[in-house]
Amino acid sequence: MTSPIITVDRVTKNFTNPAGEQLPVLADVSLELREGEIVALLGKSGSGKSTLLRVIAGLVEPSAGTVHYRGAVVAEPNPGTAMVFQSFALLPWLTVRQNVELGLRADGVAAAARAERALRAIDMIGLDGFENAYPKELSGGMRQRVGFARALVVQPEVLLMDEPFSALDVLTADNLRGELIRLWDLPGFPTKSVLMVTHNIEEAVQLADRILVLDANPGRIKGEILVDIERPRDPRGRQVQQLVDKAYRLLTDAPSTPTVTGPTTEPLPRASVDGIAGMLELLAVHGGSADLAHLATELRFEVDDLLPLVDAAAMLNLASVHGGDIALTPEGHAFVDADIDKAKEIFARAACSSAPLVAAIDRALAGSPKQQLRDGFFLDVLRRGFTEDEARRQLRTAIDWGRYGELFDYDADERTLTRHTFGG
């Protein structure tokens, strides 16, 4: 075994909420990146994947723990890394060559050497002839090629990629994944290790030598999957499908039960009632159960599309998840088979018994003299456990669920929630 290029040692990262309280995003994360390997970070939304990538890049300081590059503590932008972003992050007023030269300019490389190295990188990534084009003249795939060239021109030992293919169409993304592997196999390719954030399980299995699965709220490493399959990998092959199933099992294994349950310890999944109902109806069409990997393929869903719906259905006890499979519960069958009024009643009962935030809102409104409260009351509670954006998203989801169940209504103009009885 070679010595690690990057060592992450018990890294924790907290952010501060408006009340000055610490919100954990990453908790006690340790990992190593070694020469000759591509590693994928896979996890649900809220698992801190992108934050971890930025901590490794030296762009975000950990609250506890350390990151080492070749044995030296990273206390500033990591000199051994370069990053490719999901959003391309190109400067629109610069040409392709000028965008590629940015990192070299920051390193103080002379103009003639900058131009030579930039043109070599542009050639390597397949953008010959577009050196003087501006980003607005390029397709999404070509812009991301510029992003790769800009990262590779500084010859990083470790290439960090934050969902680099997720903003692209399917065919373009497949093409660029193939280009990445082609470059990886080139003799003399300067990058010795790749760490990639993704929410696409098939992508992780296609590209990575190891997959690290992160748990969420806060992010911590939940498990590791070794991908010992020669490239190129057949996405329909038995070995690939077995690893995809294994990843789904790891992602959907229930985390340890929180010691204190409540709105800030059991967040509502990012799932609408329509999305939950649609998935349950699809399960009914499949006879009441389905393999999650096959379901995702059928729907063309990725982790962040499917798993919030799965988590929501499981939270509400309308579906159960075990070993990478999902099945309707008796309540789920009753929900799918019911008419609209009965379905609302079933959903309301499930939300009040199993969704902590919905239940907390219902109890608070019931205890209010007018059975009415402003949304700020609930946002103040949620801000103790979430960022401002996430607190507002949690409340929006709770309002969506509560309205459907006819537990309470929301007046956006007055910013008030009002409780009413079922059918009222």
Image (cartoon, helix red, strand yellow):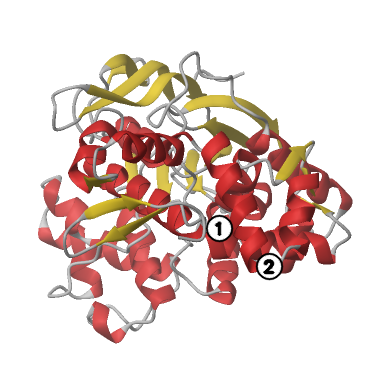
Is residue 204 visible in the rendered image? The answer is yes
Q: Nearer the viewer, residue 329 or 129?
A: 329
* Residue 282 shown left or right of residue 343 in the figure: right
Q: Which residue is rendered at x = 38% and y = 53% of the image? A: 399
* Residue 372 shown left or right of residue 255 in the figure: left
Mark 2 crowd level (few <14, some 14–19, many ≥20, 10 Å Cα): few
Residue 248 x/y as whole percent: 70, 42
> In the rendered view, would you say 358 is above or below 385?
below
Q: What is the CA distance from the residue labelled 2 to the residue labelled 1?
A: 10 Å
- The residue wearing badge 1 is 305
Checking the image for residue 347, the label placed there is: none
Residue 87 x/y as whole percent: 33, 62
Q: Which residue is rendered at x = 32% and y = 64% of the image? A: 88
Secondary structure, mark 1, is: helix
Q: Tell me the kind of residue under disc 2.
A: Leu
Q: Are marks 2 and 1 in contact (CB under 8 Å)?
A: yes
> In the rendered view, would you say 374 is above or below 236?
above
Picture quadrant where residue 177 is located: bottom right
Mark 1 crowd level (few <14, some 14–19, many ≥20, 10 Å Cα): some
- Dot 2 or dot 1: first in sequence order is 2
Secondary structure, mark 2, is: helix
* Residue 244 shown left or right of residue 278 in the figure: right
- The residue wearing badge 2 is 299
Residue 398 x/y as whole percent: 41, 48
